[in-house]
Amino acid sequence: MCGIVGVFDTSTAAQMTALGLHALQHRGQEAAGVAASDGATLRYRKGSGLVKDVLVPSVLEPLKGTLAVGHCRYPTVGGTAENNAQPLYATCRGEPIAIVHNGDLVGASLLRDDLEMRGAIFSTTSDTEVILHLIAKSSAPTLIERVADALLAVRGAYSLLILSRDTIIAARDPHGFRPLVLGEVDGATVFASESCAIDFLGGKVVREIEPGEVVSVSPTGMVSRKPFPAAETHACVFEHIYFARPDSTMFGESVYQARFQWGKELADVAPVPADIVISVPDSGNPAALGYAAGSGIPFGHGLIRSHYGGRTFLASEQAKRDLGVRLKLSPVKAVVTGKRVVVVDDSVVRGTTSKKILRLLRNAGASEVHLRVGAPPVVSPCRYGVATRTYDELLAHRMTLEESRVWMDADSLAYLPLGSVARPGFCSACFSGNYPLI
Amino acid sequence: MCGIVGVFDTSTAAQMTALGLHALQHRGQEAAGVAASDGATLRYRKGSGLVKDVLVPSVLEPLKGTLAVGHCRYPTVGGTAENNAQPLYATCRGEPIAIVHNGDLVGASLLRDDLEMRGAIFSTTSDTEVILHLIAKSSAPTLIERVADALLAVRGAYSLLILSRDTIIAARDPHGFRPLVLGEVDGATVFASESCAIDFLGGKVVREIEPGEVVSVSPTGMVSRKPFPAAETHACVFEHIYFARPDSTMFGESVYQARFQWGKELADVAPVPADIVISVPDSGNPAALGYAAGSGIPFGHGLIRSHYGGRTFLASEQAKRDLGVRLKLSPVKAVVTGKRVVVVDDSVVRGTTSKKILRLLRNAGASEVHLRVGAPPVVSPCRYGVATRTYDELLAHRMTLEESRVWMDADSLAYLPLGSVARPGFCSACFSGNYPLI
Amino acid sequence: MCGIVGVFDTSTAAQMTALGLHALQHRGQEAAGVAASDGATLRYRKGSGLVKDVLVPSVLEPLKGTLAVGHCRYPTVGGTAENNAQPLYATCRGEPIAIVHNGDLVGASLLRDDLEMRGAIFSTTSDTEVILHLIAKSSAPTLIERVADALLAVRGAYSLLILSRDTIIAARDPHGFRPLVLGEVDGATVFASESCAIDFLGGKVVREIEPGEVVSVSPTGMVSRKPFPAAETHACVFEHIYFARPDSTMFGESVYQARFQWGKELADVAPVPADIVISVPDSGNPAALGYAAGSGIPFGHGLIRSHYGGRTFLASEQAKRDLGVRLKLSPVKAVVTGKRVVVVDDSVVRGTTSKKILRLLRNAGASEVHLRVGAPPVVSPCRYGVATRTYDELLAHRMTLEESRVWMDADSLAYLPLGSVARPGFCSACFSGNYPLI
Amino acid sequence: MCGIVGVFDTSTAAQMTALGLHALQHRGQEAAGVAASDGATLRYRKGSGLVKDVLVPSVLEPLKGTLAVGHCRYPTVGGTAENNAQPLYATCRGEPIAIVHNGDLVGASLLRDDLEMRGAIFSTTSDTEVILHLIAKSSAPTLIERVADALLAVRGAYSLLILSRDTIIAARDPHGFRPLVLGEVDGATVFASESCAIDFLGGKVVREIEPGEVVSVSPTGMVSRKPFPAAETHACVFEHIYFARPDSTMFGESVYQARFQWGKELADVAPVPADIVISVPDSGNPAALGYAAGSGIPFGHGLIRSHYGGRTFLASEQAKRDLGVRLKLSPVKAVVTGKRVVVVDDSVVRGTTSKKILRLLRNAGASEVHLRVGAPPVVSPCRYGVATRTYDELLAHRMTLEESRVWMDADSLAYLPLGSVARPGFCSACFSGNYPLI
């Protein structure tokens, strides 16, 4: 998963882009980068690490110009390419462009092989570079047409932004897997993966870019096109469940509200007699409040989250294992000791953290621990941009519900029913195994 | 305010001390340091910054030995001395000692002047160095007696730990202003400012060091003395209200529970018709839940807190001002828009952040904003170790309640009554102006 | 100018490459990089700065494998592309390759335009990327043939190394502008820009790669080809005069010996009555000793060079100007005060440093200062890889000899005659303006 | 050994002090620090590392004021105290002072024990802190008198500078072991260990501070006192031989000239038939030129010194051993191959580097290698401030001349006779074992 931001027409385009990325930091902490144009020259900087550590003032300062795009990248498991950080930069027919991309293409390796056989060279292992080559291959007269040509040749999940000397082009795939929002900040046009970035910049959201829409903003104004044939929408439900920030509105819905509502449904379908409902902070908060509201059991802050990080300052893996989840979460005995505790998390993927949290709560004196999960069991890897694990790592693929409960030593364990999230217009392949696009 | 930790009799004393300080990071983020003894030599390291940044493995590695003490320091306003980080190290009569100290002495400058007139030299501006000189002046035969001699000569607030080649001495002033806890972790003896550090290390709390108690732990065992005349206890109530971590138990009470209870009392004495109760996370959480419980109004997470810091990556003060409190807190529109909102904070000192939060909520569409504060108005600076502001900076010293409400543009504003916190055995001078020791 | 190194068949290929680059650090201080192959995967790292700062152990550690190539890059004036550091990496027809390059192509921008019109994308502004595209365009069956195809399509100066999964290919242009040496270190095959790198690694030089030679070393052995038509050799004489390290042997000659000999010739053609001959250390040393030997005037160390750098620790440009050349060089009064001083430098380009040195010597009490230059006047920019200045910056282009003497306030000024360096087989375009290749 | 600088009466006192220390960097690379006064407040900064790395602009910026002192510290073998960097800072009777010190006291540990028994505390293991305590103990009315009182109580080697709010006091011990120079830079008064620092700052040397002289400079002018009884001078001859920079004038003599002269004497007393004289750069340069002048054998640059450091970028001790002295020095084959080589070094202490250099030269093809040393054999450790090695480490203590020659595989080996350096007014204890002060 990744976050992308584009800013058009303000004297501090690179700085505003970096701030927007900071608000999207939850979408990717591995690398960050910004490219900016002053009308003549594109310049870019990127590096490994958090936005605040990579895009410091001295790094942004040379990125002159009034338009910019940026990217923050999610850690990917494995992989040997060192330079998959974005933006990717290239000159195509003498025109410098930079591209940032959220999503995964389907069948990208075939396209890549075909391009290589025709003499193209690739300097990354990223799908995004395929799009760059396809843009360069097109002989259409304008950039927006070349971008459309390129996107007609690919399939899969993408929300992307392309920067040229004087234009930003924003595009969202016909199925609308990944989000992309259009906003306005002090007269500047801003594109961002989530509405929370627009809010953070003090602006207002105009609308979402529609599935299959390609928008171009340049000195001559904003143009919208729909170059693709009609297609079914498959918005990613995992964005609502886990990925997006709770203060974002996405695919027309409040993320907070969706999670709260699912928590409430969970209370209806998986009730349990208990004294207190607590959340795994912070992502489990809305579902936990929903569960408390639905069940009538009081909510308490039974786990507090450390603000100071700290894994990295430990010398040995042993020390990290010994301290385990305590480095991040501390139980509040006053809330849990001697109590029957319902702990609510947003989702469970591998289950290892959940297991540790339950043990932490038992050690702190909880008399019973009941895990409630604000999502269905994750049974299949995502093919559209969420770097979920392989089948072998997915708890719900490896064990039955009862086996999972025993393994993590919960007094009871319940997930949200698949029916609650498998709605028309949404992709729930990770919960159902039904991939809408192969 | 500061945090202190001491560890006796484990092969990783310095590392365990650093971990304990990490758990006390909320008590001081300006500087951190550790001193350790291998039975023959004392070594120490200290520096500016967070525990995880200062006490990295390569820094701790040379701090060999089985006993250690450490300190994390709160930012102090003003001051020109560069080296007030602790531990302070000195050789006294050929014996190396290191000292860490939480608290402020009363009348320290007079003692200092007197010592200087007798030829003593001071290399810091800290009260703690006075104690070090007094220990060196004593001709008592044992270190614990010399420490007792020194402490009999001073007045004020202190919880302190002293490391010699083979002994750790822990002391708490006769009035018990500051906390100090004794625990056990895997057979090692651990002293810490708060019980949460013992929990974090996976150990168990044995008891609090008592007001006026001096404890020594060495290869010959643990010895406790009470060298001071009987005195009234004045435990700091602000620890419960703001400073301590909610998962600590302090002065015999759960910090979380105390805050929750005050929030409930606040609902009784300052009710208001509203749709939702939200907290200023994370310190306002328990009081907000208490207010919700007391009032029957539902609790929601209306403000989310950023995990990624970020002030420092902004180039200009202007950018910091423009972004204001948004860098730290983001309103959740789904929770507050169109609602009558009660926002609960743990305490209000200068009021500037509260004012910004209220504006943030109004901009996010709250129809009414009511501020409820889980503490009485702060009217006087602390003289016993909390680096509160001067009179001129204290909102409640500068304005009446109604003036404050108008200035921060709240629909209503209410504090906890003084009576709720002014209990026997506690110091509430910051709320009352009645200083128990001058 | 740049330095390149390749190492084949040793378990520490990346480390040995980095060490070789360290010995070639004088050829380029702006950036450094290494690519290595473990037979299956190519990995690379590069960054701005000195070899010792960029290629630290933790950076090299992941570069597994038994073959590697590396590059150190000379600071180039101007330019906006951020990523011209080498190696350049690409996959061509599914095969990953990395390339390092010393030299400049002639007419590269035309080739580039042509490639872009056919849909190629460029991610750098470097000539080297043109070669990469040409390799990818070739449909020849083996890599060495594809490389030969590519090089037949370009003209100009290049010594280059190409790394694939199991092969290193070394090539030198038909005119032999830039050096490239083949050596052996503990059984491993090593290519390097200069022999001093082989010496530094404790190995022995086998021979120079010949102009127009393409050598391939792989598990099946070493193969040499000469794919180019016969051409005249134009070895760069400025390598001998300034660029190469004095302990290197290059184009069949000792660099030290060449400089010493030119200093001696200079004494013959430009004698002056004087008390002492001094050098501008360290590059002027051999010519100064030659001048002393030729003239019979004693040699002294009249200027000492600082080992501690330091420009960067000065806050202001003003401070740097005030301290001027003193930051790098200090006059020894015992050697120069009251003396008629001949100061010998290897070459003069802009003349600004020479002017400052002469003033330094006068201020230290020299009674006369005579500048002797171990090279002819530089009158034309290099087009083959030495980043010399533009015409406007060249002292000898802007002023006559006498004007130069007056401007720099020398009692006398003399250069080596053009005839001493304009030998067959060598390029001396920077001194003559006669470019052998346009 | 250490370097000290003081600057009085200029608006950039701290910056000028740091620049002066940069010029004295050869006297100590372990740590650096500066203290400055603005008339009311003393502020200081110090840290481990080179002047240019520790005293960067952002560190110096807060050191406001018109007077300052600074120190660079030589690496000391062993020792556990972490904070021996200088300046030392203390308040004595309410007056803040900072002190910097070059030299070692005799009998300091007795003084220290005595002070500790009277209740003094020490926070370093440095002799300098003893002086600080003695100043604080004095009840004399003025600082200069208190300093004189303190210095009358100690014996040994010291050149020191003391900074108070408005005064700098400079003192040199009665025997004048260590140098101290008075100069003027743009109207400011400057004290420095060597004249090269004054030259570097663009000023002029006024005179040396005399043995036993205490000079005070304050707003009321400069005052000189001689509080000590008459004593014999014992200026350190090792400063001339090795420690001082060749462009300094010290104890009335040019360092360069002294070394050159000794080289010439060495040619007279230890001639050898040879083809070339080379030096171990840079410290052996003057003696080598002297040897060449005395013997009539030509001088060549047979070893070149790397400007790029690099030990620290090697991962393993093994790599460092394998590369050995090549990391620092490279032989020039054109100068040494097939030649009978005389290599001249300034002094030999442990002999390990000399041995490696001789092997390097043999491997480069020298037919004979003759080592000539511009100093007598070092047979005794220094007690007056040069951190020479223990007896066991001194080559000339462990082996006879012939044993040394065989061990280092030299064709011949000769030292300067003791008589050449054992002059009246100089200490040559390291060469003779006759300590003038015990």
Image (spheres, coloured by chain):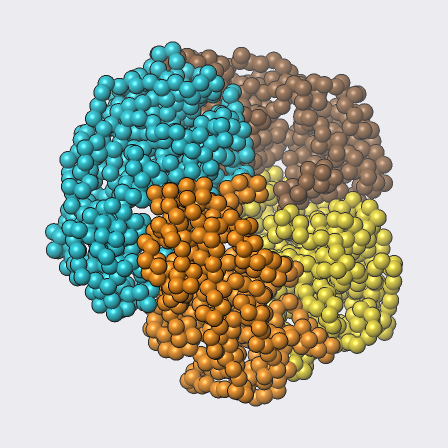
Chain colours: A brown, B yellow, C cyan, D orange
Residue D98 in sight from this viewpoint: no
Q: Is residue B138 left or right of B243 when viewed as pictured?
A: right
Q: Residue at x 72, y 65 (%)?
A: B96
Residue at image coords 28%, 52%: C289
Q: Residue at x 25, y 53 (%)?
A: C293
**Residue C224 spot, x, y in % from top left:** 36, 19
Q: Is residue A213 left or right of residue C383?
A: right
At x 27%, y 42%, the residue is C258
x and y percent of residue D42 in the render?
52, 72
Residue A381 located left or right of residue B170: left
Give the x, y percent position of residue D96.
56, 76
- Above or below for C16 versus C294: above
- Whole-percent x and y of residue B276? 65, 42
- In the image, D177 versus C27, the foreground residue is D177
Q: Is residue C361 left or right of residue C11?
A: left
Q: Does residue C148 appear in this view?
A: yes
> Where is D271 relative to B334, above or below?
below
> Which quarter of the image is occupied by the C terminus of chain D?
bottom right
Q: Residue A130 versus residue D392: which sits nearer the camera? A: D392
Residue B212 appears in which quarter of the rendering?
bottom right
